[in-house]
Image (spheres, rainbow, N blue to C red):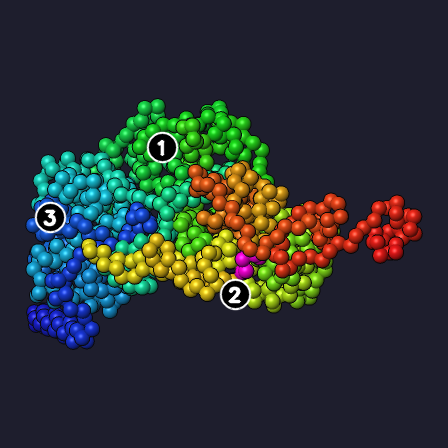
Amino acid sequence: MKYLRTLIFSAVWLAISLGAAAALALVGAALYFAPGLPDVRQLQDFELQTPLRIYTSDDQLIGEFGDERRMPVDFDDIPPEMLHALMAAEDAAFFEHHGVDPRGLARAAVQLVGSGGDIQSGGSTITMQVARNYLLTLDQTFTRKVREILLSLQMEQILSKQEIMELYVNKIFLGHRAYGIAAAAEVYYDKPLNELSLAQTAMIAGLPKAPSAFNPLANAERALIRRNWILFRMRELGYIDQSAYDVAVQEPITASRHVARAEVQADYVAEMARQFAIERFGDDAYNGSYRITTTIDSKLQPMARRALADGLIAYDTRHGWRGPEQTGIPQSLAEAQDQTERSGLEEELSESPEVIETARRAAERSQTTVEGVDGDVSNWLQVLERTHSFGPLQPAIVVSSEGQQMKVLMRGGELVTIEWDGLDWAAPYKSARYRGAAPSSASQIANRGDLVRILEREEGSWRLSQQPDAEGSLVVMNPQTGAILALQAGFDFDASKFNRAIQARRQAGSIFKPFIYLAGLNSGEVTPATVINDAPVVLNDGSNQLWRPSNSSGDFLGPTRLRVGLARSRNLVTIRLLQSIGLDRTIDFLVEFGFSRDRLPHGLSLALGSASLTPLEMTNAYAVLANGGFRVSPWFIEKITQGEQDTLVDEANPRVACRECSPEQTTTEIDGKTYEIAPRVVNARAAYLIRDMLREVVERGTARGALAMNREDIVGKTGTTNDQRDAWFAGFNQQLATTVWVGKDDYSPTAEYGAQAALPIWVDFMGKALEGTPEDVPEPPEGIVTERVDPNTGRLLGDDQPGGIEEIFDEDHLPTWQPQRVEPSVERHSGSEGTGAYEAIF
C-alpha cells in the first residue's frame, strides 16, 4: 500500500514537473522569439492584393500574375456548410481553442514518432495556418513552427475568431491560381459560394491540405476519397445529418476548369514582363496594382505563334511517329480508383472503411457514356479534361484502331474518326535521319486506351499528330525603333517555359556571314564584285589540330565574286574574306555594330558563325541592316502604370533610326513624341549594298523558297550549323525584321538545313504579316552607282569592251579597270597568244 502511495505521489510530481517544464519552455521560447516576430496588428489593415497585369500595345490582356483577390468574402457571407466543411477538414475545435490545439500537436508528434518521420497530419490549427500564410515563410523548420505557435497565441488575443476565419478563407491557395474559397468556386464550378452543393463545398474544403494531390481536375479519384472523408467527418461532428450525407457522398465529380484565357497568347512575353516587374518592384509587383503595356502587336503575335507551331509540327511529321503519350488508361473512374496510389490518404482511410466504399460508389455514379463508345468513359473524360492542349494539338484517347481507320475520344465527349490520310505518315521514328517502315494499319500506330494528339486541318478533318521533339523561336522587331512586335520562344509555354528567344545561345551559322561581308564593304576594301578563291584551305586553329573547313556541298567554285559567295553561302569565300580584312579589325567592327566582344570567338571560325548568340540578338542585328545602319536596341515594355487612375510610373524612350535626318541632328519626332537618334554604325552605302546582296540570296541562292511570297522588298539569309544542329533564317523588309531558329534543346541534330526547317516558318509568318501592305524597296542612297564588270574578274569594263554583267558600287570604292582584251585571231597573228592584252601586241 505504501508502495502504491509512493508511486502515485511520484507520478503526480512527475506530471507537475513536466507541465512546469513545458510552461517554462513556452515562456522561454516566447522571450527568445518575441523580438523577431512580425506585428500581428498589421492583419487588421490587410489589403487584398490586385494582380500584376500585362497587355499588348493595344491593350489586349496577355498575362496576369499574383494572388487573385477580386472576390473576397466577409465572415457573414461564408455559407454555414462551407464553414463546417473547412472546420471538419482542418480544425474542428477552431471556436474552442486559443490558437493552438494541444491535442492536434500531440497527435502529430505521436504520428511523427510512430511513422518513422512521416508526418500524416501537421497539427496546425486554422489560426496557425493564417499566421504562416500571412506573416511567415513556408520553410519546414522547427524554428518556424515555434514562431507560428507564438503568433497564433498573439492573434487570438488581438483578433476575433470571425476575423481570423475571414483571413483564412481569403488567403488559402486552392489550386489553378485560385486564392480563397470564392475564387475556387468560380474556377472549379463557375458558381458563387452560396450556390455550391454540399459535395462541391466539401471538395473545395479538401484542397488546402494538398491543392495538387487532391485536385478534382488533376487527381479525381484521390479527390473523391478526400471529399468523402470530409463529409464523413461532418456527419460525425453533427454538422450534417445522415440523409444529407447519403446524397452528398454519392454525387459524381462535377468540377471543370473555368478560367478566362488571355486575349492574346504571348506567355513568353508575359513571363519576361513578370520577371522585369519583380526586378523593379520586388514582391510588391504582385500586389501593387501595376499594369505593364508591352510593344507586342496583337495581330502579329498570333501569326507568329501559329507559324512556329505549324512549322515545328511539319518538321516533326517528316521524321516519324514516336508513339502514344500514355498507354492503357483505365476507361472508367471506378477502374482508375482501384488502381490509384493511396499514399498521402492514410489519415482519411484510417478512420473508417466507409470512406473508401462511399468514394467508390461516387466513382461508379460518375459514369458517363458517349454515343458510339461502349461502356463508362468517365475516367477517359477526366484524363482529357486535365491534359493540356499544346499549341493547336488536342489530346484524345483512342477508342478503336481497326483497319486503316482510328476512332478517338476528345475532351467534352466528342468522337472523331481519323481516316488513313491522317495516319499514314506515322512511320516509326528511329533517329533524326531515319524512319522505320510505313504502317499498313491503324493498330500498328496506337490502340484502345492510348493518349495521343490530334490536329484539325483547314478543311475540318482531323489527323494524328504529336508534340514535336524539336523546338524553335520566332522573333519580330520594328527595325526603326527596336520594339519587339512578336515573340514566340517555343512550341508551347505550358510544354516548356524555357525562353529560347532570350536564353538559348546557339551557334548562328551562316546567318552570321553577312556581317563579315559588311565589315569589308563598310571599310571600302571590298565590293560585291571582289573575287575571292573558293578553294581548299588548311589552317592552324590554335590547337594541335589542323583545320580543313569545307563547303556544305563538298565542292569548290574557284575564283568567286562576293555576291555569288554570299548567295550560295560558300564557307571558303567567307573565311578568306575574314583573313583579308583582319580578324581583330572585323571583331572591332562587330562590337561597334552591337555584338558583345566576349561572345565572339577570336578565330577564323567566326566567319562560319561559330559565335553562340540568341535569336533575339540575331534579330536585332538584322534590324540594323533593315534600318540602313542605325544601332537600335531591342525593348518590349512601352509603359508602366499603377492603380485605377493609371498613374504613369515609367515610359520607354528608345533611340530610333532616322535615314532622312542630317548627320548633325540628334533627335527626331515620331507621332508627336521626341526620340534620340540611334548612332549610325554602318555607312548608308554599305548598308544598301549588303541588302542588295541579300536579295540575291532570295533570288538565286539558298533562300529561293522565299520567292513564293512574290515580293521584291524582302531579303534574308539561311543558316545551318555543324551536324545540322541548328537551322536558321533571318530576313527583313523595311517594316519588319524577323528571325526563325529551329533546333533541339539537347543539341542533337535536326537533320535539316535552314532552308528546310526555318525558312518555311519565316515565309508563313511574313506572308501573313505583310499581306495587303505595299512593297517598300528602299531607294539607293546618294553615291550608289551601277557599273558593268567582268563576271570572272570583277573588274570594270570599258564602253568598248563587250559583254559583262551589271553590279552596284559605292562610287568612292570602285574596282580597277579590266585590261582591254583582243580577239584570239589577232593574238595569233601578233605572236602574243595567251596574253589577251593590247600592251603585249604593241
Q: Nearer the viewer, residue 535 or 437?
A: 535
| Residue occupied by mark 3 | 78
Q: Position of residue 343 (x, y in %)?
A: 30, 49
Mark 1 lies on a secondary structure that is strand
Horizontal side of 652 relative to 153 (left or right) equals right
Disc 2 is placed on an element classified as helix
Q: Which of the pair 593/245 is nearer the observer?
A: 593
* Distance Cα–Cα, label 1 vs label 2: 55 Å
Q: Of the residues under marks 1 and 2, which one precedes in the sequence?
A: 1
Q: Is residue 10 above or below residue 213?
A: below
The quadrant holding residue 769 is top left
Query: Which of the two labelled residues, at mark 2 and mark 3, occupies the earlier sequence position?
Result: 3
186 vs 743, left or right, is left
Q: Residue 658 appears at what percent x and percent y?
A: 45, 57
- Asked if labels 3 and 2 touch by Cβ distance under 8 angstroms, the answer is no
Q: Which residue is mark 1?
A: 410
Task: Say what amino acid the circle numbered 3 marks.
Answer: Ile
Question: Which residue corresponds to the image point at 12% horizontal and 42% vertical from the top-left?
Answer: 194
Residue to which mark 2 is pinned: 592
Per the picture, the main secondary structure of the magenta-coloured stretch is helix
- In front here: 409 or 507? 507
Mark 1 surroundings within 10 Å by alpha-carbon count, few (fewer than 14), some (14 through 19), many (20 or more): many
One can see residue 126 in this view: no
Question: Visible in this render: residue 456?
Answer: yes
> The disc labelled 1 sits on which kind of residue?
Met
Is the residue under label 1 in contact with that under label 3 (CB below 8 Å)?
Answer: no
Q: Which residues are magenta?
A: 682-686
Q: Which residue lies at the image location 10% right of the left edge and 36% below the top edge?
A: 243
